[in-house]
Each structure stands twice: as structure tokens, then as C-alpha cells.
Image (cartoon, rainbow, N blue to C red):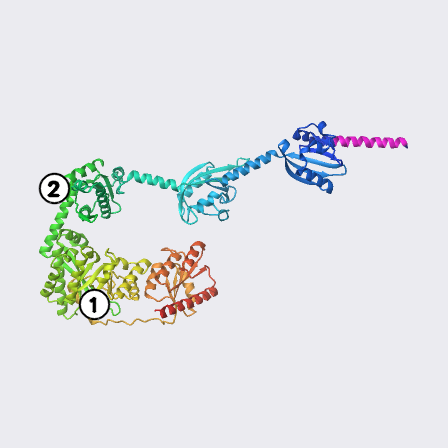
Amino acid sequence: MSNALELQLASCQEQCKRLEARLNRLLESITDGFIKVDKEWCITNVNPAAERIIGSPREALVGQLLWDAFPDVKGTRFETEYRRAFDESVPASFEAYYAKLDLWVKVSVHPNEEGLAIYFQDIGQRKKADVKLRILERGIESSVNGVVIADARAPDLPIVYVNAAFERITGYSRDEVMGRNCRFLQGDQPDPALGQRIRRELDAQRDFHMTLCNYRKDGSPFWNDLHISPVRDDTQQISHYIGILNDISAEREYESRLAYHADHDVLTGLANRHYLERRLRQSCTPSPGQPQRIALLYLDLDDFQSINDSLGHEQGDRILIEVAARLVQQVRRSDTVARIGGDAFIVMLPEPDDIIAIVERLLTAVARPYLIDQRELHLTASIGIALHDGSGAPDQLIQQADLAMYQAKRRGRNTYYWFSRELDDRVSHRVALRSALQRAIDEGQFELHYQPQFHGASSRVVGYEALIRWHHPERGFIPPGEFIGLAEETGQIVAINDWVVRTACQDNRRLMDMGLGQLPMAVNLSPTQFHRSGFVEAVLAMLEETGLPAALLELELTENILMDSTDKAIETLSALRQHGIGVVIDDFGTGFSSLSYLKHLPIDKIKIDRSFIKDVISDHRDAAIVQGIIAMANRLQLKVIAEGVETQAHHAYLSRLWCDLFQGFYFARPMPFDDLVAFMREHNARAHETDLAQPDASTPTILLVDDEINVLRALTRTLRREGYRILTASSAQQAFELLATEEVALVISDQRMPEMNGTEFLKRIKALYPRTLQILLSGYTDLKTVTEAINEGAVYKFLTKPWDDDELRLIVHQTVREAVSLHDDTGRGG
């Protein structure tokens, strides 16, 4: 029995030794450091990894107290965690820095019956990486350049990170951009070519750089110097894209200023010789099959040096600045005005069809008096003209114009001279036209056509306007725009105007004698004739000669007549009024005279220029101008006549604005005298007032606007049963015409229409008809556009397609009730 026990005991001991050996081999093989301490804090075991990490051999540690082997851990987290694990018999895990060894370790402490098992691993590299990462993150966050990171593996490359500089540059916060594609920075209407280029570069999977215009959150543009780089993972697959944004708007502006100063004269701000020569070379390069024609005007001030000598260079510079401004005012946007030194200027005309008119305007502008320090100075200029017709070197053009300018000075100054034979031909044509014009005056080639003017409320003819026509024996009818300006410049306009006034008076007297009414005849008056001495007496003499009462003559003058000698002009107008002659301001709103004179002018009517009438039913700006003119005229007790009234919508809309009189193709075209006689006889014979059937005023009118006829039919079926009066339009223009003629309470419009979108259409309606409410109906939702329209008051309600009939009827009912209330309140408010 004893032997058996001994054998069993020996076997157990042997097994324990094998287990201990296996455990020791396991401890020695693990990469984590291991220290075992007993309940007396004595170190009983240390594995090789611990020796390596700590830098001390096992023999120097085993048998020592933990606190003696590592005295520097006292009072640190190491001691706190060890004692807590020992006292509470709970495991502990923590990271700590051991200063003595400059070592970051991750420690796991496990209590057992024998004491503590302490495992630790060197995490210094990870900590260094963390520090490096934090430094990099801090560097990115503090960078002045914007940084954006997009996920290359997710659909549409969503943004996953932006730094503070990105927020500052773009105005967008992190939360606002996370998950979006960067293309939103390109604005509401991105450039397709730009998008294609970016996609090509991304598909190439390489770094690329580009400069593009982006837009901040507030809509302001900025120039973005953009660098984009792909980021690859361990498998060399692209996982992210990093974009570096650099706002170079200031640099661009600075470069623009440098470029501007390189191309412009410092004193006057005009182009300089360098810019002119470059523009000239570009313009003289012809397109295939289309040789470029360019005229060059070389303008030199006459005897300018004497002004510099007498007044000094400072005053001379002020005159040069004023001359430059006057030259710019007299040319077109496509023309180039340059100062090439001293008192020499060059004007380049890329479309030289009206060179003569431009040259004479320039000479007139330069010759106007200059007021310098309460002193009035007079100056003239000489102009040389050279023409490039596609042949010859463009560099010679300046020299040719310069030579022509000197020839002009030799011819007496304050004139011009042609270098080109082709332009000589143009002068010959002008001379020929002037001769033909004189022949027309002498031979009576002119005739008058008359356009009736109507009273809006009664539709009765209340007057006529005499319009000149030149019936050339070879060219046929020549439009007034081709010869009136020349006649003004040559002074022939005086004889023409005399003939027009006399003939108009004679024909109006004939209408009286035929029993066709005593109505005023309006005649356009030339500024040249108006400012002539003895003008009033000449008009009175023609009235006496023709036997026409003064009250039946109206003289139409433009606002620009008042620009020169305003006091004298008012005196002349007063004299006309004293004799009973009517005075009308023609083309009102297009001139440059001050409105402050209007209250002093002795006039009877103002005529609204046709340029404001053309789009008055659809353009809220024209409508506002017309409404303002009519309201102002009514306050001043002046009659208003609108010319260019071509449609019934024009007439209805202007009548609603209390316009008095109308003239235009809608009523009658200009006609020869015999046709006018027939027209007036027919007009007087028929009834002047027609009662039009009007809808019940108590029935609200709804206007439906949609380019799909099926939608209009469906809406009409849904709403007509509610008792509304329904109008339909398939386009914005049709809708504007209906609105001009009908009292509409509510407009329901589709968002997508070919002419303009629904929100823009309803904005115009809001401006033109503030008492009409609007509902926007759309099959898609552009929340930004719709929200802006609602906030601006252009959209009262918004519904989506397809609509629910019950919901539609309810909303329409509520909106119509509000619109009717708005109409009633406005009506009571006057």
C-alpha cells in the first residue's frame, strides 16, 4: 500500500513538474511582459518579454519586493491600481507612463490565491502615432487652407470631414456639408464642362490641380485654387479623396488691378497705347471668309498747349479727364477709346457703319464749354480717320489716322479728314443724301401720314399726329430715322419742319371744313427749330395763313429740348400756351431733363414712350414706370397719352391705370390724308360705345396656367362645380394678356413652363397685381426656390402633383375667400 502511494505521489509530482514547465514555456513565449508577485509583494516570476521591456534581467528582479525593484511607481497610478486589485480581489486594466524608463505601457492586473499576475505591453509606438495624429489633426484644423475629405467607396463621394478653414472660406458648417458631394460649391447652375473635367481627373486616379469659381453659402463667388489627391489603402485601392481649397480671390483681384493698370492710362482711366495696339491686332485678324472692317479715329486737341502754358498742368489734366469722359459718352460699348499720350486720343470702331455721326458727335462734345474754377474755357479737336478693310498691315492704321488728323488741322481745325478712299465714298454718299434731301425739300417729295388718337373710355377720336414720310423717286419710301438726324445736323430740318407744320395745319383745316370735327393736330418739333429766334411768331403766322384755330395745333417736343437754355425754353413754351397752342412732352421718360422742371413747364399733355408700353402687361418694371408717370401726371392735372398701344391687353391694362388717351396700331395705323377722311367718316357714322357682356362681379375668377391641356381640363372640372368663373392659359404670355383684361382673384400656375418657371411667373404677377393671390402647383419640389417665393410673398400656397381633389377645393376655397377679402379691403381703402 505504501509503495502504491509513493508511486502515485511520484506520478503527481512528475505531472506537476511537466505542467509547471509548460506554464513557464508559455510565459516565456508570450510577447506581453509578465511579472508575478506573492501576497507579500515579492516578485516570484518574470518572463523574457518583461526582461526585454523593463531592461533588467530576471535574476535581478525575482526575490525582491515590487516596491524595491520599482521604487518610482510609488505614489503613481501603478501603485494605486495594484493595491486596489490586491485589496478588492478585482482585475484592473489601465495605460500609464513610466517616467524612469520613458515607457508607455498597457497593464492588466489579475489577482489570484498566490498574489498578483501583472501583464503589460509596450505601447510607446502607438502613443507616438497618436501624438503624431493629433499634431496632424491640429495642423489641419489650424491650416489657413480649407481641407475636405470625401469617401471614395461610398456612392457620389460624400464628404466625411472638413476643417475650420473650409467653414470660414465657404460659410458652410460641418453639419451642413457632411454627406454631400462637393459639387454644391459650384452653385445652382454648375458648368457641365467643369464637371466633366473633374470626373475625368477622378477616373484617372491621380493628383490634379485646377482653379475654378465656387460660391459661398451667401451666394458670393470666390476663386478656388483646388488640389485633389487620392488616398490608397494597404491594397492600393483608393479609399478617400483629399481636397485642399485655397481662396485666391484677393490674388485674382490684385492681378486684375495690375492687368488693368498695364492696359489703362493712369490719368483718364482710358485704354493706353499698349492695350489699343493689342486690341487692334486682334480685331484686324479676319475670320475665314469674313474680312474685318475697322475704323480708327485719331483725335488731337487744338492748341491745347496754350491752355497748359496759361493755366498750368493741373488744370490741363482736369480738362483731359473731362475730354476723356465726353468721348466715352459719345461712343458705343463695342468701341474702344484710348489715350496714347499728351492730348492725343484714339477711338477704334469695330463696326464702322456710322462713322460720320460718331465723328461729328465727338467734335460737338469736345467743343462744349469747360468750366474750370468758375472760368469758362473753349476747346476744339481735329480728327483723322483711317479704315482697315481686311487688307494691309494693321500696324499702319494708327500712322494713317495720324496723318489724316494733321490734314484736318491744316484744313482749319475742328474738323475731320479721311485717309481711306472707301470712307471718302461714304462722305460722298452723305453729301449725296444731303443733296437728295435738299431736292426733296425743293420738289415737295415729302408727304404726311396721320395717326388718330383715341379717348379710352369713349373710344372716340380726340386728335391726330402728323408723321412725315419721304417718297424718294428712286428708292421709294425712306424711313425718317435715316434722314431726320442728318437734317438736324445740316440745318435742313428747319425747312422740313416748316413744311410739316404748315401742311398739318392746312389738312386739319380741311377736316374742319368737311365737318369731320374740330380736333387738335399734333406735330413733332425739332429742337433746332424750337430754339430759333422768332419761332413763336413763325408758328402764329402759319396758323393765320391756314386759318386754323391755335387750339387745334399741338406741338410735341422731347425732354431734351430743355437741356439747353432751360429758362429760355420755358419762356417759349409759355408764349405758345398764351396763344392757345397745345404743348406735349413726347417720349416722356426717355430723356435726361430734370423732373424738377416739370412742375414749372406750361404743358398740356405728356406722351409715354412706346418702349415702356411694349411689355407693360408682363414686365413689372415697365408697369411701375407707366403707373408712376400716370399718377404723377394726374397729380399735376396733365393728360396722358400712351403711344405704341398695339393690343387689346395694352388698352385694357392702361385703362385700368386711368390712362386718358391712346395711340397705336390697335386703334389705327398712320394713313394718308384721303384715307384719314374715309376713316373719320366711318368712325363718326357708327356708334362709339359698345356694351360688353360682363361676368357677374360677385363670381370670383380663377386663372389656371399650365402648358398641359389635360391638366387644365382636370383642374377646370374640379373647380367649376364650385361655382367659380374659370379662365385658362397655356403660357405665361397668354396669362398676362388675360390678367390685363380680367379681374382675377386667384392664379393657379404650374411650376414647369417653357417660357418661364412658375415661381418667376408668380413673382411678376405679385408685382403687377398685388391683390391677386397665387397657388403654385408642381410635380417636383424645389424647396429652396419655392421657399424663397413664399417668403417674398409671390406664392400664397403650394400644392404638389398629383393633387387630392378635396384638398384642392378646400385650399382654393380658403384662398379665394382671402383674395375677395383683400380686394374688398383695398377697394374700401381707396
**Which mark is nearer the camera, 1 or 2?**
2
Query: Is residue 232 toward the left or the right of residue 597 in the image?
Result: right
Image spot of residue 421 (x, y percent): 15, 40
Image spot of residue 176 (x, y percent): 49, 49
How many residues crowd mark 1 within 10 Å: few (<14), some (14–19), many (20+)? Answer: some
Looking at the image, residue 699 lies above or below residue 74: below
Residue bearing the label numbered 2 = 411
Provide the residue span drawn in magenta. 2-22
Total labels drawn: 2
* Secondary element type, mark 1: strand
User: Majority secondary structure of the magenta segment?
Assistant: helix
Q: What numbered label is drawn on residue 711?
A: none
The extreme right residue here reads: 1
Question: Which amino acid lies under the numbered mark 1 shown in the image of this protein?
Answer: Val
Q: Looking at the rendering, which quadrant does residue 716 occupy?
A: bottom left
Residue bearing the label numbered 1 = 462
* Secondary element type, mark 2: loop
Image spot of residue 386 (x, y percent): 18, 40
Nearest the viewer among 560 and 739 is 560
Question: Which amino acid lies under the numbered mark 2 shown in the image of this protein?
Answer: Arg
Image spot of residue 692 (x, y percent): 30, 71
Residue drawn at the location 40% of the way across and 57% of the way down? 759
What distance separates the C-alpha of mark 1 from that of mark 2? 54 Å
